Amino acid sequence: MNDKELVSRMQHGDMQAFDELYERYKDDAYRLACLITGSRTDGEDLAQEAFVTCAQSIKSLRDGSKFRPWLLKTLSRAAWKYCRKAKRETPVSEFFDTGGSAESALSAVLRTDEQRRLYAALDTLDEKRRVTVVLYYFDDRSVREIAQATGVTEGTVKSRLFSARRHLRQALTEERKPKEAANHG
């Protein structure tokens, strides 16, 4: 059954349809909430809260086929509010498995150091640019899907990606300079 049919059933009081939508999108919602907030516990709470909010206002959704973007938009806004209120940094590295027992110890150290630098640079982005980068690079979402999920235009998504890339490039380059100076000094 597609989203449009499930939403229609839900709008007519069928809570089993809600359960099906929840099962379909709970992992996406949880991952996004965790990446924005930097906390698995807070991510879980916010994801559940977004589902409850959507369930309570389901009658306002006119196009049931757009349930997923509507859910992610609801979730993104709640997570941004949470981050502003809590003034938290997002330790994104906590959410990506760095396993891989077949690699050498040196490879693991180098990979871990590169990831640490990347995640530290990601942490310096504001929430809106961080969410855009996470959705684009880590969740493989298109510009159009990100625009729908965050409630902005595709041009705004492209602008945020451009700005975030420039910021990340600068942050990663500047972090490398002190190490290179120390090694050559």
Image: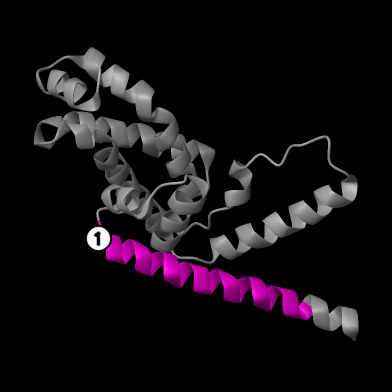
Residue identifier under label 1: 153
Instruction: Name the residue nearer the viewer: 81 or 147.
Output: 147
Element carrying mark 1: loop
Q: Position of residue 176 (x, y in %)?
A: 73, 74
Number of marks present in the image shown: 1
Q: Which residues are magenta?
A: 152-178
Quadrant in which the N terminus appears: top left
Percent position of residue 32, x then y: 44, 43
Q: Is residue 13 left or right of residue 183?
A: left
Around disc 1, counting alpha carbons within 10 Å, would you say few (fewer than 14), some (14 to 19), or many (20 or more)? some
Q: Give amino acid for label 1.
A: Thr
Q: Position of residue 170 (x, y in %)?
A: 59, 76
In the picture, measured across the screen, residue 12 lies left or right of residue 104, that is left
The image quarter in which residue 19 lies: top left
Q: Is residue 66 above or below residue 91?
A: above
Residue at position x 33%, y 24% from top?
22
Q: Main secondary structure of the magenta part?
A: helix
Instruction: Name which quarter of the figure residue 13 lies in.
Output: top left
Q: How is the image coloured?
A: one colour
* Residue 35 lies in the magenta stretch: no
The quarter of the image holding the C terminus is bottom right
In the image, 74: left or right of 43?
A: left
Residue plotted at (34% across, 61% down): 157
* 180 lies above or below 35: below
Q: Nearer the viewer, residue 95 or 24?
A: 24
Which residue occupies 25% across, 20% down? 18
Residue 163 sits inside the magenta stretch? yes
135 up-or-down from 21: above or below: below
Outermost residue to the bottom: 185
The image position of residue 31, as x and y in percent, is 47, 39
**Residue drawn at the location 18% of the way across and 27% of the way down:** 4
